[in-house]
Image: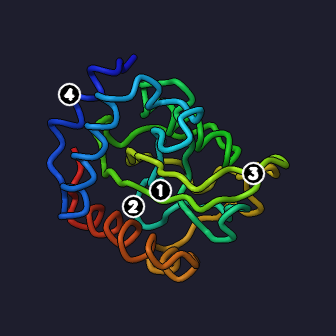
């Protein structure tokens, strides 16, 4: 079980990949240290989330979902909802969102971190104001032969893509340029524990 303090220690130890991560690391640490409810979506300004960059064993494919709110193919992940063990959150979200059971961390270390803007939207019939997701990403591995299934209240597609296909499938330019491209590069150079 990763406690709040252990997560802070992991974030402090994490070596940012680029300027975006350098700046976002400062924001994330400040948010966790200064907000008792940093891990709860009841904090309407910002809250912690966990994402997963899910690859197959050969590291030649990436698993993505078609996200209903964002109308785009995207990575998997979700809200911490009070949990400080964000790796467990990422694994749980992949299992729920893709309907798979055979998924595990390539490493328990942080793979990347991001401050993500979320535009106002309607979820389960209620309006959610624009806010930030302070996100920790983990590199996970799954079996690309395992049958996948959608989670109808969140996504309408689950599929494996070659990395270059994944970049073309996403319709969110900021994610393609600043997140997915970064994750693919880190994977290619073997920048993970």
- Which of disc 3 and disc 1 is earlier in sequence? 1
Q: Residue at x 76, y 55 (%)?
A: 122
Q: Which residue is mark 4?
A: 9
What percent of the width, then of the height, locates residue 114?
36, 54
Q: Which residue is mark 1?
A: 56
Q: Nearer the viewer, mark 2 or mark 3?
A: 3
Q: Nearer the viewer, mark 1 or mark 3?
A: 3
Does residue 70 sit above or below 125 in this rendering? below
Q: Marks 1 and 4, Cα distance to the nearest angstrom? A: 29 Å
Does residue 36 sit above or below 43 in this rendering? above
What percent of the width, then of the height, locates residue 81?
57, 29
Q: Are marks 1 and 4 in contact (CB under 8 Å)?
A: no
The 10 Å Cα crowd at callout 3, few under 14, some 14 to 19, many 20 or more, is few
The colour scheme applied to this rendered structure is rainbow
Does residue 119 sit above or below 113 in this rendering? below
Q: As drawn, which residue projects farthest toward the right?
A: 125
Q: Marks 2 and 1, Cα distance to the nearest angstrom? A: 5 Å
The 10 Å Cα crowd at callout 1, few under 14, some 14 to 19, many 20 or more, is some
Q: Marks 1 and 3, Cα distance to the nearest angstrom? A: 36 Å
Instruction: Indicate left or right for 48 with 18 as reference.
Output: right
Q: Which residue is mark 3?
A: 127
Q: Are marks 4 and 2 in contact (CB under 8 Å)?
A: no
Q: Marks 2 and 3, Cα distance to the nearest angstrom? A: 38 Å
Instruction: Indicate left or right for 163 with 114 as reference.
Output: right
């Amino acid at each position: 079980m990763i406690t709040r303090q252990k997560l802070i220690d992991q974030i402090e130890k994490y070596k940012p990949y680029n300027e975006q991560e350098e700046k976002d690391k400062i924001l994330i640490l400040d948010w966790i240290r200064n907000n008792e409810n940093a891990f709860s979506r009841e904090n309407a300004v910002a809250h912690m989330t966990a994402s997963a960059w899910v690859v197959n064993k050969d590291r030649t494919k990436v698993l993505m979902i078609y996200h209903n709110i964002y109308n785009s193919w995207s990575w998997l992940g979700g809200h911490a909802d009070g949990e400080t063990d964000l790796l467990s959150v990422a694994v749980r979200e992949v299992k729920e969102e893709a309907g798979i059971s055979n998924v595990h961390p390539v490493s328990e270390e942080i793979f990347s971190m991001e401050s993500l803007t979320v535009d106002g939207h309607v979820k389960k019939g209620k309006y959610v104001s624009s806010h930030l997701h302070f996100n920790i990403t983990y590199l996970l591995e799954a079996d690309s032969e395992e049958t996948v299934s959608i989670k109808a209240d969140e996504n309408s597609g689950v599929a494996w893509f070659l990395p270059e296909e994944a970049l073309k499938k996403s319709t969110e330019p900021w994610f393609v340029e600043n997140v997915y491209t970064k994750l693919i590069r880190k994977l290619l150079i073997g920048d993970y524990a």
